Amino acid sequence: MNDRALIDAFGRKITYLRLSVTDRCDLRCAYCMAEDMTFLPKREVLSLEELESVAAAFIDRGVNKIRITGGEPLVRRNVMTLFERLGARLGDGLEELTLTTNATQLAKYAADLKLAGVRRVNISLDTRDEDKFARLTRRRALSQVLAGVDAAQDVGLKVKINMVALKDFNQNDIAPMIEWAHGRGMDVTLIEVMPLGEIEEDRFDQYLPLTQVRDDLETRWTLTPMAQRTGGPARYVRVEETGGVLGFITPLTNNFCAGCNRVRVTCTGQIYMCLGREDRIDLRAALRGDEPDRALHEALDRAMRGKPERHAFDIDAPGAAPAVARHMSATGG
């Protein structure tokens, strides 16, 4: 049973797992979570051993890329144990082990991540202006983040910068961010704000269409479309003047679901077949039941039958409720 590929009802083969290890984060980004967040009790969160079991089941079913997410994954106690155990599967069903991080803890862990088999990291960074960073994240931690970028590059990790485009906030920071990153050999991906979870601000007021951003960038640079595809949401261009790669993730202006090859598992063991929908299947119950191996694979089969054709994101009016009630930090970034 374990060698059956994970193929959904629309013929899409699932080869990519985003596995959250915690809902906790040491930043409080305004588009991601409320400032006064209530985090999950420990008993609801999968142990590192359970997270490893989930990952192993996916690898046995044909998943060859795993991205560790959070919250902020590097705040999870003893998380390097999980990286080391999953890294041991590289070349044995697993082709790539990566993570997405805010980089506040990356200076501490970069060398160990490289030793565990991680070769690439995505770093979430929306501005390099210290005051804007503090307002957005509600923390003065930009120097820690930049130290994490330096440490990652120093040990030979390939770095990509993920930048959420926010109207009337960081529009003027986008081109300088691209120039800085490309000057250091780092790719950049721009992301439209996603309507997940209740926050203090109205996401309609934050929403900056990337079609507008791209039009603005094309008055400055030559953007040449690339054939590069990862099965994910980004569409890529080469910025001829900088020589670097720029991605656009556009859940609102351009639906990207036809080639979806991924699912997300939360730190509580809930598998979400689509980021933009509430449907989920409980893997934690399977793991903690009498026959965990059988129950886990049966749950994965149910998940494939339930994966929808597309997401349901929309930001169509001021004051509209979020498309999904849960926060991004609870889902896995």
Image: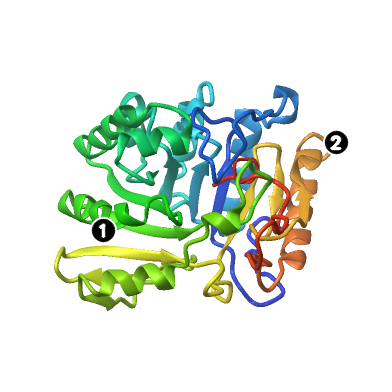
User: Which residue appears at 67% of the width and 77% of the height?
Assistant: 10
Residue type at mark 2: give it: Asp
Crowding near the residue tagged with mark 1, few <14, some 14–19, many ≥20 C-alpha atoms within 10 Å: some
**Res 155 → quadrant:** top left
Report which residue position mark 2 lands on. Answer: 290
The spot of residue 208 in percent (x, y) is 47, 62
Q: Secondary structure at mark 1?
A: helix
* Looking at the image, residue 70 lies above or below residue 244: above
Q: Which residue is mark 1?
A: 175
Among the two numbered marks 1 and 2 on one chain, the one whose residue lies closer to the N terminus: 1
Query: On the image, which quarter does residue 102 sit in?
Result: top left
Q: Does residue 320 appear left or right of residue 233 in this picture?
A: right
Q: Secondary structure at mark 2?
A: loop
Q: Which mark is residue 277?
A: none
Give the image location of residue 284, x and y in percent.
76, 39
Q: Label 2 crowding class (10 Å Cα cut-off): few <14, some 14-19, many 20+?
A: few
Q: Tell which tag, 1 or 2, sits nearer the viewer.
A: 1
For the N terminus, give its image quadrant: bottom right
The one nearer the camera, 7 or 241, is 241
- Of residue 58 and residue 327, the one placed in the foreground of this image is 327
Q: CA distance from mark 1 to mark 2?
A: 55 Å
274 on left or right of 83? right
Task: Work out which residue is located at the far right of the displayed protein and give it.
Answer: 290
